Image: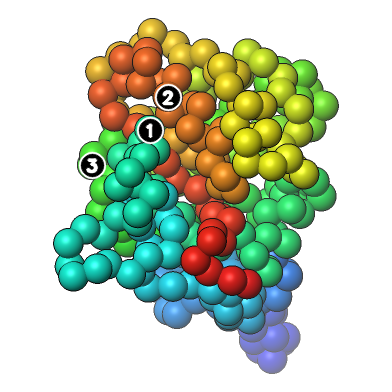
Amino acid sequence: MRSGCGGFIRILGGLWRRLVHERRCSFCAAPVVPAALAVTRDFIPICASCLARLEAGPRPAAVCPRCGEVTAPVGGSSPLCGGCLTEPPPWEALYFYGFYHGYLRQLLLQVKFGRALHQAEALGRLLAAQPRLLEAAGSWDCLAPIPLHLARLRERGFNQSALLAAPLARRLELPLRQRLLRRVVDSARQSGLSRAQRQSNTSGIFWADPDVRGRRILLLDDVMTTGATLRSAAACLTRAGAAGVGVAVLGRTAGRNWRV
């Protein structure tokens, strides 16, 4: 009888350990066992193998803090790239996790087109763990994801930027405001368009709520390619009276100074 009770207790103990101390990787479902007492709100359920694949992509040390272009400061004068010095984008700062390449690109495509919605939570937490973004959290009044047009939202069933924004808003302790910006024009899909075509395609596609006046708003999108969509959104918020705009994206397409 005693041995039977001991076996039952061991089974319960094993189940408890699995429920409390073991989670599954959001990307490959492998077990992820954090260190003792390390299960906190900041725990990101990603296994070591997937994290290594994510970090294997190009991650240069020096990037322009305004647009993310790879840059090498000349003479310690300005950290900005030449493009931002001559024609700065309509936002104050850009924060991003990594370049839109390799495994990160694969995961984002799975969320967007493969409906792997459970992965968005972990990807949002990855972005939220970036030190530069955490340090600047107090600079912003709220977080606003780039919206989809209502027709596109009905077709897809979800807004991937809003899914990524939820864990970021929690970690930065910022209000998530999904109605500050509205997409009023259902523009053509951006993939396959040139830079000039993307800029023309995104002109005047957003409307900002008057409530943006005086607010410092952090915009969130999944990927920044040419930046045309984000430029249009940031410019719209500024015209509506926003006191400042920042941009956070999970992936940024590698620019002219970085080859992948």
**Depth order, front residue of 166/153:** 153
Check the image and report above or below for 202 versus 63.
above
Disc 1 residue type (three-letter): Pro
Three-letter residue code for mark 3: Gly
**Mark 2, other Cα within 10 Å: few <14 / some 14–19 / many ≥20:** many
The residue at the point 69 percent across, 42 percent down is 194
Q: Nearer the viewer, mark 2 or mark 3?
A: 2
Provide residue 171's location: percent of width, then percent of height: 39, 48
Q: Can the viewer see residue 200 in this picture?
A: yes
Task: Using residue 245 as the reference point, say whether residue 204 is left or right of it.
Answer: right
The residue under the point 68% across, 54% down is: 108
Q: Is the C terminus in the top left, top right, bottom left or bottom right quadrant?
A: bottom right
Query: In the rendering, at what x and y percent does residue 36 appear?
Result: 43, 79
User: Do labels 2 and 3 touch, CB within 8 Å?
Assistant: no
Find disc 2 in the rendering and name its residue.
235
Q: Position of residue 95 (x, y in %)?
A: 40, 51
Q: Nearer the viewer, mark 1 or mark 3?
A: 1
Residue indicated by mark 1? 90
Residue count near mark 3 (Cα–Cα under 10 Å), binned few <14, some 14–19, many ≥20: few
**SS for callout 1:** loop
Residue 239 in the image, given as x and y percentages of width and height: 37, 15
- Alpha-carbon span between mark 2 and mark 1: 6 Å
Q: Which residue is mark 3?
A: 138
Q: Is residue 60 left or right of residue 182?
A: left
Relative to 110, say whether 177 is above or below: above
How many numbered discs?
Answer: 3
Asked which quadrant contains residue 102, the reply is bottom right
Mark 1 residue crowding within 10 angstroms, few (<14) / some (14–19) / many (20+): many
Quadrant for the N terminus in the image: bottom right
Q: CA distance from mark 1 to mark 3?
A: 20 Å
Residue 190: quarter of image: top right
User: Are dots 2 and 1 in contact, CB under 8 Å?
Assistant: yes
